Amino acid sequence: MNEEALNASVRKFLKKVGVTSQREIEQAVRAAVSGGKLKGNETLPARVMLKIEGIGLAVEIEGAVELE
């Protein structure tokens, strides 16, 4: 196994996850605020499930998205 290749591949994947997740969350929050579903001052619980087939990795990561 090439440690440098693994590290670069993981970083590339996490960058894609981060950028995509941020865009999707921001769009959904803006739509919910403009649609009246949210006031814009909430703290929203958030959860992500990370799975990697082939190695049996399944990790749930919890946090919160604060709007104010």
Image (cartoon, helix red, strand yellow):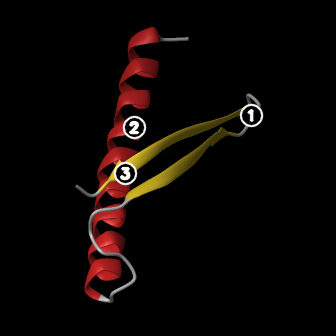
For numbered disc 2, what is the local secondary structure? helix
Residue in front for this viewpoint, 16 or 3: 16
Disc on res. 65? 3
Q: Amino acid at mark 3?
A: Val
* Pair 2/1: label in front: 2
Q: Quadrant of the N terminus?
A: top right
Give the label on residue 54, or none: 1
Q: Please report the residue visible at 43 percent of the width from the left and 46 percent of the height from the top.
A: 64
Amino acid type, mark 2: Leu
Name which residue type carries label 1: Gly
Quarter assignment of residue 32: bottom left
**32 lies left or right of 57:** left
The residue that label 2 is drawn on is 14
Residue depicted at x 71% and y 39%:
53
Q: Nearer the viewer, residue 1 or 51?
A: 51
Q: Position of residue 34 (x, y in %)?
A: 25, 85
Mark-to-mark CA distance, 3 and 2: 19 Å
